Image (spheres, rainbow, N blue to C red):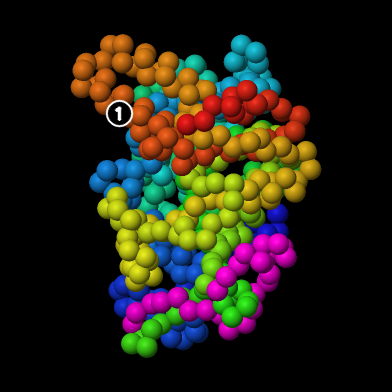
Amino acid sequence: MKLIKQFCSFVGKEIDIKQASLINIVRSEIAEKGAISFPRFWHQALLHEKFGYYMKQDVFNKDGDFVTSVEISQMFNELIGIWLLNTFQHIGVLDNNFRPTNQKMHILEFGPGLGTLSSNVLRVFAQFNLLENLQYSYVEYSDYMRKKQQEAVLKQLQKSNIYPKFEYNNQKVEKFESDEVNLKWFKMYEHFLYEETREGQHCDPVLILAHEFFDALPVNVFEYSNGQWCERLVGLDNDGKTLKFVLSDGPNQNYFSSEIKKLIKEGDTIEISPQSGVIANSLAELISKVGGAALIIDYGEKRAFSDSVRAIQRHKLMDKKDILNKPGDCDLSAYVNFMALEQAALKVDGIKVPEIMTQGNWLEQMGIQARLQILCKNANKATEKRLQSEYERLVHSNQMGSNFKFMCIHRTKNNNLFPFIQDAQQIYY
């Protein structure tokens, strides 16, 4: 848990805002201190308190810079809700008739976006009369996004005549509480751990959702130069204005076996995300301690990547050279190394990580075709066409069905957690 506190406290020392643009702030920091790490630049670009990409604007949906599966179709969100209910039953929080036991249902969502997934999950729970005895916790760094999420979630609850009361405590927790549902927003995972798992505090089993969260965590990029690995830092060009990658002076830690070394050549690069491993390990520790499971959904593979960092603006990939020179105006992301997440989680005793599934396979196993048929049954032609298009976009291998993966972390004793079982793994999309 010590490492996760280091991650959660990683904000860096802010410099005075003398010029109203993020790139000037970054230039000033480099001019004063020298080249900065790429993760430091990444953090400033996305999470600077005033100018960070996620701190000032709605970046999701067709009017933003990108659209996630959550925003594409209600079917995706509904099946997540069904998976949560099925998993609560599997681990004993709900009985065989899907009725509450003596434990609370507790959901923890990382990076909840616009609150769309959460709103749909609550709608599914309401249809099963399971809103009572539910705690839904959120980890969201951006004040702007927290307000968006709260608006969406409270609007959904009002449809069930639930009107939670707001409370703010000195542990930086924004609470909305009612007799049925408790909602809690935390700026950092560190705050959640303190509030929910500190000594003397009871925490029920928790199901964790992380949809397109890990891809937004910064990566360190290392380049093989003159027979050694050097880290790519962010510095200034000769004009004193243009940001560019520069290499660290000395060699960094060697991450490779002698066999791999033979294949390495000058200029090769590799991306490593230490924070991702820290968080995956901490989630496994939490699950080991209190019970539950984690569902991680992101694009990536079970391997390391060399050049996956990308910037997106207005639904288009930006030129590589613009990644550094438009901080705060575009999204930064990198492919997720699921092997690294798995290895980090498995360092915790009593934890299992089944084989990852493609998004297409997971959705099919969870019954998306049956749900599509039900929705289309009473739909007009235009709605039916839209639903069919949403289905194809989510499931087909030439769209999102193969690139996006579903990963699960759970206790070893909660084996065969559907659909992460061997028979379901055989179908590939």
Count neighbours of disc 1 (C-alpha within 10 A) and say few if under 14, some if 14 to 19, many if 20 or more: few
Where residue 203 appears, x then y in whole percent? 68, 37
Q: Residue at x 63, y 51 (%)?
A: 340
311 lies left or right of 209: left
Which image quadrant is residue 150 in? top left
Q: Residue at x 36, y 27 (%)?
A: 391
Q: Is residue 112 above or below residue 40?
A: above
278 lies left or right of 159: right
Q: Is residue 139 magenta?
A: no
Q: Is residue 254 above or below residue 417?
A: below
Nearer to us in this view, 232 or 71: 232
Q: Which amino acid, mark 1?
A: Ser
Q: Which is the main secondary structure of the residues drawn in magenta?
A: loop
Q: Which residues are magenta?
A: 241-266
Q: Residue at x 29, y 50 (%)?
A: 315
The residue at the far bottom in this view is: 238
Where residue 229 appears, x then y in whole percent? 61, 74
Q: Quadrant of the N terminus?
A: bottom right
Using the rendered image of the protein, determine whether residue 92 is visible from the camera's viewpoint: yes
The residue at the far front in this view is: 262
Where residue 327 appears, x then y in whole percent? 36, 67
Q: Residue at x 71, y 37 (%)?
A: 352
Nearer to us in this view, 324 or 2: 324
Q: Is residue 262 magenta?
A: yes
Where residue 210 appears, x then y in whole percent? 52, 42
Residue carrying label 1: 389
53 lies left or right of 419: left
Mark 1, secondary structure of its residue: helix
Using the rendered image of the protein, determine whether residue 169 is visible from the camera's viewpoint: no
Nearer to us in this view, 40 or 236: 236
Nearer to us in this view, 171 or 227: 227
